[in-house]
Amino acid sequence: MNRRTLLRGLSSIALLASASAALAHHGTLIAYDRTKAWTRDATVTGFHFANPHPQLFFDLKNADGTVEHWGAELLPNPAALIRNGWTRARSEQALKPGTPVTVTIAPPRAGGMVGLLMKITDKDGTELLKDDGVPPPPDNSLSAEPQPAKP
Amino acid sequence: MTRMPRARHVAAVVAAAASRAVVVALAAIVAAGAVAQPPPNAARGGPGYPKVYDPNMPFEPKDIAGIWTPNGAGYGGGGRCRDCGDRGFSLEFPELTAAGKAAFDANIPSYGRAKDSDDAKAHPEEHIGRRRAQAPALGNDPYQSCNPMGMPRAILYPDPVEFLVLNDRILQHFEWGYGLRTIWMDGRRLPKPEEIDLPRWWGYAVGRWDGNTLVVTSTGHDSRTWVDHFGYPHSDQMVLEERYTRINYDTIELKMVLTDPEYYAKPWVAQTKRMHLIPQTFIQSSGWSGLLEDLCAPADEVDTFNRLIRDPAGTGKPAAPPKR
């Protein structure tokens, strides 16, 4: 076995062993440093349910009374949110401007008031926009009515 | 609002299935019946993909109509299923020509291990194409602006593709970008790359059956698309061969070879990929089933996203004002 063959073999094993690591190398993640994530209370100022990634805009109020205007992208795309029951209507309802939330943000490596939204909870502690990677059970009734929001 | 009677829905699906059964074997009738009534959720959560069907059910090898997905959760971006192969074209090291190397260096991807990072340095066994990612704002991935992925990148993307089989062609309808690719099965000759005046984002493709394998040969691919998200380039001289084999009820295996003498010194063989069958009822939104219209549209929404979020994130500079 020559060196390259050996290296390729090891590479295959490494890739098989780290299937979940594929997500860790998503293009969205290159710009942000998740090891420096922070959590703060925030007030929603806007939400875009749009491809390629939805965006949340929010304000942070500092102790000295100053307000910072932030924006963050979500890792799930709209299809993933839909898959998890977070339809556009439900998402926009949960994130109307003025809504108090708690956000966990991975800041950009380059600095600035933008980030990657790691987690968002409402004032009751319920996690919003959660992407658990699990598809909802199928509904084969093909109703013309909107599906009920999932709990 | 009125709810569509379940009996009518089932009748419609069964009728559609029956029309297919005219042209396929008896085994496919059984299969089509299964398409009409996917098993309950208890059948989900198989080994790394949404296992809706029993892969051991009888099937017609040449019946490839339906929605096939390499996505671990079925759809919605994210990761490919464990047995589907990764999002790169190949694990083999490509042998680039001088022109190919220049094109490779000009492409700056945002996928893979971060350029010059400890993570990248720790994996010399991987080709450098997988270890040179930069923030989207610093890269030039055509996907960053939601341009068509083209082939083979589109078939590597972890979202479903529906195969629509007509008498004279097979259409591949990709959920991401709602892109449509035509594979002509009418016996026409594929032009030589040098005969093509106007390359296409989805290329020019013909198909034929080699036993139970659908062999698709294509060329005339617009060189602005990338081979995969690692930024491997192709010229408009690329000829791509794809071999699709349905190996069991719910699995298609795909083998590919990329030949591009302008950019690659020898044909580049892809990692074997797989995709799995899901019923169209698996994908639901607003009580409607079938592929999502997964577009980046209108285009200015993408521009806004890049301007407000991704560009500042990559550069550290405040968001630029709108262009208009």
Image (cartoon, grey):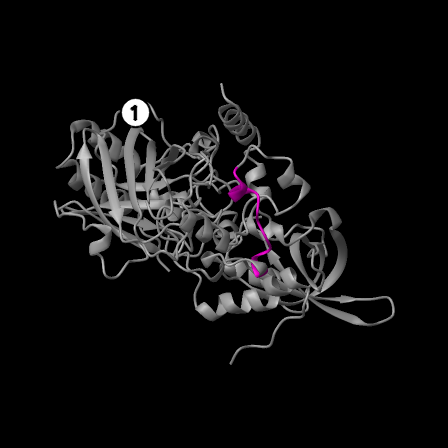
Image coordinates of residue A92 in percent, x first then y, are: 56, 63
Residue at image point 38% right, 36% down: B270
Which residue is identified by label 1? B57
Can you see residue A132? no
Residue at image point 50% right, 21% down: A2
How many numbered discs, if any? 1
Q: Nearer the viewer, residue B35 or A113?
A: A113
What subunit carries mark 1?
Answer: B
Q: Is residue A147 left or right of residue A33?
A: left
Residue at image point 35% right, 40% down: B68
Q: Is residue B272 left or right of residue B217?
A: right
- Please identify the quarter of the rendering in which residue B121 is found: top right
Can you see residue A135? yes
Image coordinates of residue B46 in percent, x first then y, are: 46, 29
Whether the magenta-drawn stretch holds residue B105 is answered as no
Q: Nearer the viewer, residue A126 or A76?
A: A76
> Which stretch did the figure color magenta?
B127-137
How busy is the neighbourhood of tag 1: few (under 14 within 10 Å), some, or many (20 plus)?
some
* Mark 1: amino acid: Met
Image coordinates of residue B248 in percent, x first then y, are: 31, 27
Q: Is residue B92 above or below residue B192?
A: above
Instruction: Find numbered disc 1 in the image and state the secondary structure of the residue it sits on.
Output: loop
Q: Nearer the viewer, residue A14 or A5?
A: A5
Q: Nearer the viewer, residue B200 or B163?
A: B200
Image coordinates of residue B141 in percent, x first then y, are: 48, 56
Q: Is residue B72 above or below residue B46?
A: below
